[in-house]
Image (cartoon, rainbow, N blue to C red):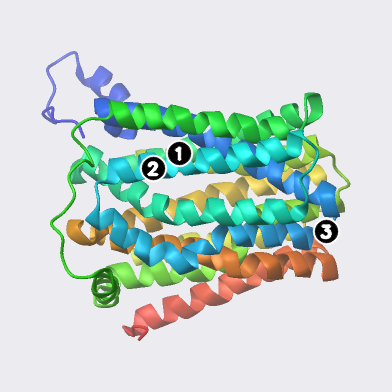
Amino acid sequence: MSTSSPRTRPGTAGAGRGTEPARRMFAALRIRDYRRFFLGQLVSNTGTWTQFVAQDWLVLRLTGRSLDVGIAAALQSLPILVFGLVGGVAADRYPKRRLLITCQILLALCAGALAALTLTGTVTRYEVFVLALLTGSVSAFSAPALQSFVAEVVGPEHLRNAVSLGALNYQSARLVGPSLAAALISVIGIGWAFAVNAVTYCVVIGTLLAVRGSGDRAPATGPRSKGQVREGLRHVRRRPELLWPITLVGFVCAFGYNFPTLLAGFAGTFRTSAEGYSFMTTALGLGAVAGALTMAWRGSRGTRRLVSCALGFAAAEAVAAAAPGYPAFLVVMAAVGLVSIIFNTTANTTVQLSAQPEMRGRVMGLYSLVYSGGTTLGAPLVGWAIDAWGARAAMAGCAAVALTGTLTVASAHRRGHAPT
């Protein structure tokens, strides 16, 4: 946030107006430690998206079934249901930077193991499933620590902008990662995509070591973990500004955010190659980048804005399901990406800014549980629906579920009711 006076000297007003939007959009990057962290995450996220695409394509090559793609995605998200709240407690109890470095080492080992199995030609779907489960288990501890670590690096003044820039970072990697995966798959093989991802975790470790003065101090030891989990849940239940956004995220993400499974199904519908599949993911990412830039410039929060975004997302997915051909589908998926990231960033910003600092790890653990847990429960069902009825019907069903859940939450919010 700029600290300059709103008044300007004669002859400088025009220049100030021209540069102020850019300064506001990238305000958090003026913090040195956040710049280092941001660059490390950009490298890591690119590797993560490379592995996402490569893993989906590997499973399709091994089995030819969208259901198995959904199972792999579910197994990678399943641990958040078991460890999500515990991961939030860990983020509040232990030094976040050390916790994150430990997680990066374990994630690098998982990616390296999958690379070795694939390159030696010994991989089966069962090894993919096991490594997806292990990766998800580590991520259940990494996710809440990562989000609350950002808050410590930038402080409350720049948190809203940092959340938006984090979304921009992740979605920019979505543009590069799938293309990199397609190139690696086509030129030297799927296994090298996993090897590249393993290396990117080493970059993150280096940037975390370079970030000083943030996330090193653990809070004083409080009640036992079980009591801390209950305390976090009570904190959310008693605060509507936390409860409603998290509830709405659960409804929308359960089916509507299963993009890897849905796009794998549409790859069959449109009879595309690995490159064609990556173009669909890239189109989604282009729209998401536009949405993230919009949020960095004009960040918003609040349940009413969140409901509007959710309705727009459901409408965009419904239109995508009816797209007459591959080019039209790419265009509409860009719109889906734009609305999805505006929804997600608005929800994340609202929750982080509404949580008490000493509760932020547990609140974000619950947020991650609902966000990823919803997709975990929905992924196998979406994969089954694609195999049974086709990708178009499955996506239309996802849009219908998101719409129904949004209308339900909006109605309850208007009446002032709260889930119990």
Kindly report the distance in space between the C-alpha atoms of the residues bearing marks 2 and 1.
5 Å
35 lies left or right of 132 = left
Please name whichever residue, 393 or 367, is drawn nearer the observer in this view of the structure.
367
> How would you rate the neighbour count of disc 3 (Cα within 10 Å): few for under 14, some for 14-19, many for 20 or more?
some
First reached walking from the N terminus: tag 3 or tag 1: 3
Which callout, 3 or 1, points to the residue nearer the camera?
A: 1
Q: In the rendering, which numbered label is found on residue 102?
A: 2
Query: Could you tell me if the residues under marks 2 and 1 are in contact, i.e. CB atoms within 8 Å?
Result: yes
Which callout, 3 or 2, points to the residue nearer the camera?
A: 2
First reached walking from the N terminus: tag 3 or tag 2: 3
Residue 282 screen position, x and y as percent: 65, 38
Residue 38 screen position, x and y as percent: 38, 31
Residue 321 screen position, x and y as percent: 74, 60
Q: How many marks?
A: 3
> How would you rate the neighbour count of disc 2 (Cα within 10 Å): few for under 14, some for 14-19, many for 20 or more?
some
Could you tell me which secondary element the residue under label 2 belongs to? helix
Check disc 1 and report the residue beneath it: 105
Residue sitting at x 33%, y 32%: 208
Residue type pointed to by label 3: Arg
Check disc 3 and report the residue beneath it: 65
Could you tell me which secondary element the residue under label 1 belongs to? helix
417 lies left or right of 59 = left
Residue type pointed to by label 2: Thr
Note whether residue 79 is visible.
Answer: yes
Residue sitting at x 61%, y 73%: 401
Residue type pointed to by label 1: Ile
Residue sitting at x 35%, y 86%: 420
